[in-house]
Image (spheres, rainbow, N blue to C red):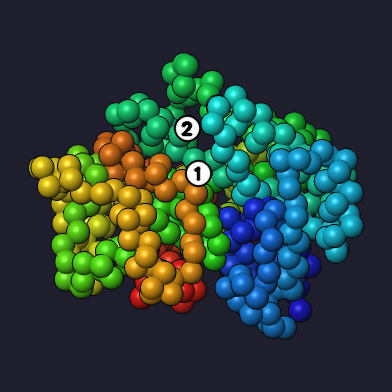
Amino acid sequence: MAEVARHALVFGASGLIGWGIVDQLLSNYPTEGTFSKVTALVNRPFEIKDSFWPEQSSAIPELQLVSGINLTEATVESLTKQLSIYVHGLKDATHAFYFVYKSEEEPEGEMRVNRKMLECVAGALNLLCPKLEFLVFPSGTKAYGIHIPGGVFTPPYTESMSPLPEPFQSTLNYPALRSVLQNASNSKLWTWCDIRPDAVIGFVPNGSAFNLTAHWATYLSLYALVEGKGAKIPFPGTLKAYNSLYNEASAEIIAKCAIWATLHPEQTRDGQIFNIADQAKPESMKERWPALAGYFGLEGTAPAEDDEGQKMLKPSGYITKHQGALKEAGVKSSPVFKGEFLDSYGYYLDFDRQLSLEKVRKAGFREELNPNRSWFKAFDRFKRAGMIAG
C-alpha cells in the first residue's frame, strides 16, 4: 500500500518520453509506494499487452490505459467530458506529466495547435482535479538555437541564457506554452516546471516521430544483415558534426528527473527550467558511433567525405532500398515518421552544443546514466519486440 495515494496522469504515454515516464512509474521510481496509480493517456490505439511496460502486480502502481484522447480536436468542454467518463479516480489525480507535441509544416500552425492542446488539458485539469499538485512538461534545445546553422550561444548552455535574437525567438513554441501554464496555475494549488533535454534516446513499441534511436537501430541492424558482421560503416554525417560535443538524454533519465521534479516542488516550482542529460560530461559521435555500430557487430568509422561518401545512401535511403531484407528477417514494421529529417542529424548539428546540468544538480537531482548503455538498452528492447534485425 502506498503511504500517500498519488495518482499520476501521463498525457502522450505512447510517445518516446511519455512511454519512459510510465515505465519508470511502474518500475516504482523513486521507491515502491511513491505512486499508487498511473493513468496513461494516448491518442492512437494502444493495448497494455503490447506496451512492454512492467507486468501488473500488487507491488507496483495500478495502471489504467485510456486511448482515443485526441487533443488536436478537443475543447476544454469536450476533453473534460471525455476524461470524466473514461478516467477512473480523476478527482484524486495529484501529478500530471504532459508529453504531447504535434509538428506542423507551418510554424504558426504548429504554435497554434500545441498551445490549444495544452490549454485544453490545463483547463480540464483545473475543472476535474482538485488535488492536483504538480505538472511537468518538456521544452527543448531549440530554445538555445540549435536549429540555427552554427548555433547562437557559446556552450555549455544554461537555463538563464538570453532569449534568441529575432526573428528566431518569435518562432519558438515554448514561450507560448509556458504562458499557458503560468495563466492556468495562477491562484491554483498546483505548480509546474519545464524539463529541457537535447537529443532523446529511447524505445517505444510503436511508430514514433523524431526517434533517432529507432532510426539508427533499424539502419545499423539492417546494415549488419545485408553487408555482414565486421563491415565498416561510416558515420552518416560530416567530420565536423562527428567531432562536435553534446550530451544526449535517455527517456529514462528524463522520466526520472521529471518524476523527481514533481515530488520536490520546493526546489522546482513556478515554471523553473531544468536542463537534463544522461551525464554532465559532454561527448561526441567520435566516441558514440563506434560503440553503437559495435553493438551490431559492425565497425563504426569516421564519415566518408570523399567520392565514396557522396555515393553512400543516407540511412532512410538504405532502409528503403533493403526493405525486402527486413521482411525476409521477419522484422515487424517500425515506422519512424520523420526518417528523412533524422538523416540530417549528422550534417546540420556540426557545432558544440552541450548542456550545463549545474542547476538541476544544485536543486538535488544527481542521477547519471552511461549514454552507451542507454542506447544499448533501447536496442535490446527493439530487438525483443522484433522491431529490428537481430
Of 75 and 161, the residue lying toward us: 75
Q: Indicate the secondary structure of the residue bearing disc 1.
A: strand
The amino acid on which the numbered mark 1 sits, given as a three-letter code, is Arg
Residue pointed to by mark 1: 196
- Tell me which corner region of the image, top left, top right, bottom left or bottom right, holds residue 91: bottom right
Q: Residue 247 in the image: state x and y as whole percent.
A: 35, 49
Is 289 situated above or below 170?
below
Q: Which residue is mark 2?
A: 143
The answer, for residue 95, to whether it is visible in the render is no
Determine the image quadrant of residue 295. Answer: bottom left
In the rendered view of the protein, which quadrant contains the C terminus? bottom left
Q: Are marks 2 and 1 in contact (CB under 8 Å)?
A: yes
Q: Of marks 2 and 1, which one's residue comes earlier in the chain?
A: 2
Q: Nearer the viewer, residue 145 or 29?
A: 145
Q: Position of residue 120 (x, y in %)?
A: 77, 39
Q: Residue at x 41, y 53 (%)?
A: 212
Under mark 2, the amino acid is Ala
